[in-house]
Amino acid sequence: MSPRRTLSVGLAVLGLAGAVFVVRRPLVMAAPACLAGRWHGCYDTENGLILMMLVGLPPAALLVWALAYRRRAIGVSLAWRISVADVGLVYGTVPFIWMTLMPGPGAGVVPGRVSLVPLRDLITMGPLGIGGNLLILAALGFFAPMRFAALASVPRILALGAGCSILIETAQFVFRLDRVSSVDDVLVNAAGAALAALASRRWWRTTAEEPSDQHRSAPAAATSGPR
């Protein structure tokens, strides 16, 4: 492993350890319910979901290794990058979307609320709210260009993030989850996806690279006819 890669991995581990240290108390509060396998108190709380995401990191890493091993065995180029992107897209996006769809105390009773004035809700969000909204689609923005050449563009990722966020806000309103469907959420979610895409730009897939997991034996088969 090169010194630069070693430094990057070390910084990532230190960053993760620091984040866990900051949120250690809420995670400890959710631990009893999660360890007991109870839905209430674990999977219906943000603390519980974050805890289970941390617990699930080793299985996710094992899945990345298994996918990369299989792809390398059949001759797929960039096997590790594709495998990390596949797992990262799902593992880093689904739990955060789940959090945004958690019902509030007045779910099903309080009518849906909509805020369509841009930038009005940013003040009430506060730094923590803005940071959380930036993270919701960050994994999508980071890994999608690594996996799909068609998405290797900041404007496309911005549009994809905005579209996904609009679907989330629409679901909050339609299912009456006691949440405010805000245009500012869409703006911040899309911005988070775009910023994350910029962070992964050096690993984006290009059209010149192999587009899928297809075995390279197809061209060989085409040239192995009767002689």
Image (cartoon, grey):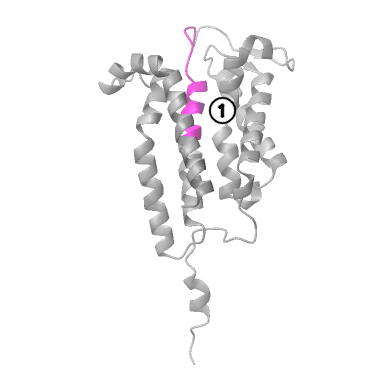
Which x, y percent locates residue 199?
62, 39
Q: Is residue 212 above or below residue 7?
A: below
Q: Which residues are magenta?
A: 92-107
Q: Residue at x 61, y 19 (%)?
A: 130
Q: Amino acid at mark 1?
A: Leu
Q: Secondary structure at mark 1?
A: helix
Q: Is residue 193 above or below residue 151?
A: above
Which x, y percent locates residue 21?
42, 21
In this picture, residue 39 sits left or right of residue 132: left
Q: Is residue 3 magenta?
A: no
Q: Is residue 109 above or below residue 129?
A: above
- Towards the viewer: 221 or 171: 221
Q: Residue at x 38, y 24 (%)?
A: 51
Residue 37 visible in the picture: no
Which residue extends farthest left?
36
Q: Is residue 195 above or below residue 44?
A: below
Which x, y percent locates residue 29?
35, 13
In this picture, residue 105 sits left or right of residue 154: left
- Towards the viewer: 120 or 2: 2
Q: Residue at x 59, y 23 (%)?
A: 133
Q: Residue at x 40, y 15 (%)?
A: 26
Residue 89 visible in the picture: yes
- Towards the viewer: 171 or 104: 104
Report which residue position mark 1 lands on.
135
Q: Is residue 97 magenta?
A: yes
In this picture, residue 19 sits left or right of residue 137: left
- Towards the viewer: 225 or 197: 197
Which x, y percent locates residue 169?
60, 22
